[in-house]
Amino acid sequence: MLNTNKQAASTLIEVLIAVSIIALVLTAVGSMISMSIKLADSNEKQQLALQKAEEALEFFRKERSINSWYTFSTSLADEAIYCVSDLPESVASMSAQLGVCADDDVLEAARYKFKRQAVIDFDGLNSVKVSIGLNWQEGTKSKSLSLEQSFENY
């Protein structure tokens, strides 16, 4: 009879140890899944921000290719910031968007909100650099991405 009680007690300890190991493994797997989801969300936001920055640069490329240098360059102000949450119809209407984006000037893409701005910097009369910047929030952190391109008078 004593032998049976010892065997039952050791079986109970074995079960407790096994349950503890399984709980530890499940906690680690759950943590890895949670981190993977956060990383995938962060990568998705960054990829979408890159896509929206390229979209704005493509707008300037298109405007440069269909307009004369005079029309393109005189429509923009030197050392100016334009809020381009919505792309204008043409570079000639850019003056309506002059200034830093307000808090409610957001570009919504998928389920994310971005602030997209263009910074114009003339380098003499025959060259202009356009920098597109996107800002967004990831939890408590502010993230940003910037692309730039120079346009020349040809």
Image: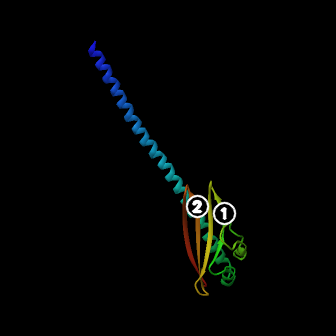
Q: Is residue 85 above or below residue 122?
A: above
Picture disc at residue 103: 1
Element type at marker 2? Answer: strand
Residue 45 x/y as whole percent:
56, 57
Q: The residue under label 1 is which amino acid type? A: Asp
Using a 10 Å C-alpha cutoff, classify the residue at mark 2 as few (fewer than 14 neighbours), some (14 to 19) or many (20 or more): many
Q: Determine which quarter of the picture holds residue 67.
A: bottom right
* Mark pair 1, 2: CA separation: 11 Å
- Location of the N terminus by quadrant is top left
Residue 39 x/y as whole percent:
49, 53
Residue underneath mark 2: 136
Residue in view at x 55 percent, y 69 percent: 146
Using a 10 Å C-alpha cutoff, classify the residue at mark 1 as few (fewer than 14 neighbours), some (14 to 19) or many (20 or more): few
Residue 92 x/y as whole percent:
72, 77
- Location of the C terminus by quadrant is bottom right
- Left or right: 67 in relation to 45: right
Q: Is residue 106 above or below residue 24?
A: below
Dot in front, 1 or 2 = 1
Q: Determine which quarter of the picture holds residue 18.
A: top left
Q: Determine which quarter of the picture holds residue 19.
A: top left
